[in-house]
Amino acid sequence: MANIYALKSQAAKLVVKGNYAKAHAIYQKVKEIDPEEPGTYNLIGDVYLKMREREKAVSEFKQALELYKKVQYYPNAIAVCKKILRTDKDQTEVYNDLADLYVERGFIGEAVINYLEYASRMRKEGDKKKEIEAYKKVIELGPLKIDIRNRLVDLYIAEGEREAAIEELERIEELLIQQGNQAKLPEIEEKLAALRIGEPPTSKKEKREEYTVRHGFTVEDMMGEGAKLGAEVEEEIEEEVRENISGEEDVSIEQEIAKLHENTVIPKTEPVTVENLPPPGKSELQVAPTEWTNFEELAELCLSVNSKSDAIDYLYKAGQMYLEENNYEKAIKAFKRIINIRPIELRPRQKLIEISLKREDMESAAEWNLDLGKCLYQKGAIAEADKAFKRALKLSSSKEKIRKSVQKIKGKKKEVKKVEIELPSISLVELLEEEEGKAVKFKVAEEKEVEEPVTFEDLLEEFKEGVLEYIEDKDFDSHYDLGITYKEMELIDEAILEFKKASKGEEIKLKSIEMLALCLIEKGDLDEAEKIIKEAISIDGHKEVEFLGLKYNLAQIYEHTNKNEEAAQLFREILNDDTEFKEAAVKLKELEERIEKQKVVPEKKVEVKKKKGAIPKKKVTTKRKKKISYI
């Protein structure tokens, strides 16, 4: 067993250094030693994600999921399900697995959310049998939900299951009588009469409501009809779902704290109360995870499989609910826990300031303003940091102490400048926008690549805390790591300098040049990016597969500069070396169609150019997250 721990530790260090191939090989050895350990499959999946091999990552996560289910370790199985959906939201069957697991844990509200999502996807795929099964599970959890029973009746009729439809309609009739809802009885009786004589129902066709999956689905939602959503509310919820089921994108520091002036509010859910519960004997529903302790428990479970983003999302919800209940001590604990996970997250500090002011604890408010200012200063929002420092001075009775602390913070800033860091002026509103974006987790998330215990994100946090030590010129790996950090901070010029230094190291030359090219593309310096990529591709002593990422980036440059033939040729070369490179296949198809269209009407294009004269070049920007690396 000690051997396994040593191997895992060795692999983790390789991951931090970006040597994913060697890390993968070591994890495979660990898997051979203990094939029944689900955590190993989880780690291998994380490595595949870093290598941009999402299909292989999903395959490993699924094996981890099955092993966790086999040993009935449902908490970790839930977290792995969410990892899979963050990686690939189209893994439809995982929604059903996730719902089943939530039932096992007693989190009925979350189970319903996922069963409805699964049913919706089955409907789009035309699989009515699986859709029926999903709705039957929902009804078992919420037997009083008439609108879902109506949907089930429609499905039974469509599948020719007349007896099942009659039985369901009779149950709906009973429920309507119990609830005193006489208005809908004639329609139900008309349907029943038609079905009993073997005729299809002739009731008015209505636009069937799409079941929108949303967080905060409570036991109360399952107790009765509930209020119907207006168009505006539906649009808001649908937008929330679109955000929640998408992977988290890289965003600029300038967008990180946009909502700090607006008293950021975490999405609220209505807690279950005695008034919400059904009459005795009518339901055995358990409380959904909208209670504080359940959110905190889910946060810890997410952390156990390194899903930090989901954990932070749950802690925000717990903290906000405690805050609304005026349970300040527990709210403070939740927001401090977030700071422990992400040391320079801004929003929990804003919440802690809010709590301090509500409690009229001016000294604590001053301390948290000072801490907020320190974070802002490290993020480069100098003007906003000074505002926080001034608020701290105003609130505190120990003004000299605050002044000395501010001087110390700014002194640390100067030390960091010795390694030639120049932070741009950043506004407070723009900075919180980025952080708000990062906080969207369910990320069925928020997020971003799945994190290892020690990742570049951790290195970035440490750097911003001012603990980065001086790096020697020949420490190429550290220069590369620092370049990654700068790029994530959108300090592109500084990142370029670090990647140039890192490219002098033979072992990481290609991947350093690849990152350098991406930075130049991001700046719009396509000529220089093209030049260095061509030079890199001509370097001897490397396998063709090692050049795939560079060739892909060069093809994109050609595409943006209308060199479509050259771009297409590069994509063909990539596919010749790697037939599973799906992005290249998609790009090649698009280019070939574009080239064919251009061949059809070449004269027309020439005439337009002559009439209008030279067309000025547009600045080319590239989306982040488009880098494909095989190194």
Image (cartoon, rainbow, N blue to C red):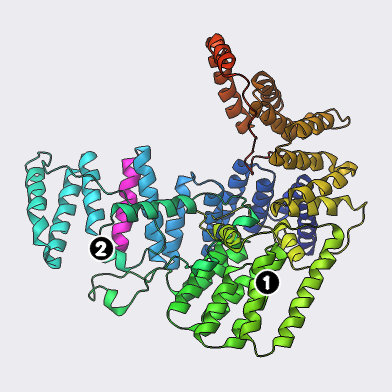
**CA distance for labels 2 and 1:** 48 Å
Quadrant in the picture for residue 517: top right
Which residue position is annotated with label 1?
A: 386
| 401 sits to left or right of 240 | right
Dot 2 or dot 1, earlier in sequence: 2
**Residue 23 in the image, given as x and y percentages of width and height:** 76, 50
- Which one is nearer the viewer's eye here, 450 or 103? 450
- Which one is nearer the viewer's eye here, 556 or 370? 370
**Residue 220 in sight from this viewpoint:** yes
Does the magenta run of residues contain 128?
A: yes
Which residue position is annotated with label 2?
A: 226
**Residue 146 in the image, given as x and y percentages of width and height:** 22, 58
**Residue 516 in the image, given as x and y percentages of width and height:** 78, 41
Q: Amino acid at mark 2?
A: Gly
SS label for mark 2: loop
- Please provide the residue range marked out in magenta: 127-143
Q: State the residue at coordinates (66%, 57%).
A: 451
